[in-house]
Image (cartoon, rainbow, N blue to C red):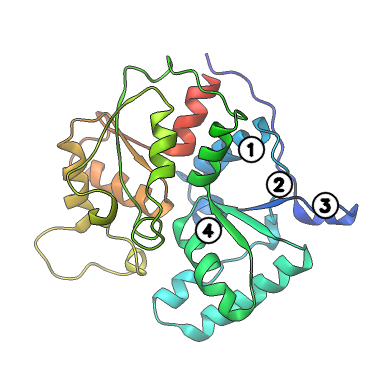
Amino acid sequence: MEQQIQYSVPIMADLAASGKYPEYLFWVGCAGAFDARYKKVTVAFARLLNHANVDFAILGSEETCNGDPARRAGNEMLFQMQALKVIEILNQYQVKKIITCCPHCFNIFKNEYPDLGGHYEVIHHSQFLQELLDNGRLKVDKQVLKNQSLVYHDPCYLGRGNNIYEPAREVNNALGTTNVEMPRNRSKALCCGAGGAQMFKESEPGQKEVNVERTEEAIKTKAGIIATSCPFCMTMITDGLKFKGKEDEVKNYDIAELLYQAIFK
């Protein structure tokens, strides 16, 4: 039976009102705040942060889109308007370190915000979870998922975009699952099909959707779990499983959800 976990999510404005500025800002992101499926990832990750006694807060209603989809779609003016607004808010709260579950948010904060004056230490949640495991702040019961097989899909904006491949695998290796790889992995991994603002436009003519191709590749490994670490990837892989009629046989979980299961169930 799942443990009843008490947790809280501090709001940056509430802490600032009492003169407190946490070490980390947890940037929730659009999917983490509004997508019904990915909100479960947000909750799991926030509970893990609480359990590890991480000093963090979120912006809450002050968080707005950081402009990544606008820039990817070619609307540079909208991107800069959004980015400058976000930078103003972050600087107001003396933010120095940002944790995010979204590789797209990670990439734009790390690589593109500095051009507009936004300089922060940016950490993807796979990196942060690996660190918490390595220093013993999170401890896993490997018996919980020991009978499960798992395959990991590399997000483009984390992998090829920023050369980050191993932290998520280290988290998965800590779970006690049997882990396998798709033939195309790491720098040669196939995109889920949603990057570069493709998530927000109609499909172009072709023989097969990219997400279906990638999902088929994952299904062929015979793993019972497809692990992801990106909200775009989760949407596309989940849709691929539904298209193939495999959603009851194969489950798609974010690495934070899997780690949460392995600790609290």
Secondary structure under tag 2 reads strand
Secondary structure under tag 3 reads helix
The mark that comes first in sequence, 4 or 2, is: 4
Residue of label 3: 14
| Mark 2 Cα-neighbour bin, 10 Å: few <14, some 14–19, many ≥20 | many
Q: Residue at x 54, y 32 (%)?
A: 133
Q: Position of residue 185 (x, y in %)?
A: 25, 48
The three-letter code of the residue at mark 1 reads: Leu
The mark that comes first in sequence, 1 or 3, is: 3
**Disc marking residue 49:** 1
Res 6 visible: yes
Spatial CA distance of label 4 from label 3 is 21 Å
Spatial CA distance of label 4 from label 2 is 19 Å
Spatial CA distance of label 2 from label 1 is 8 Å
Residue of label 2: 56
C-beta proximity under 8 Å, tags 2 and 1 = yes
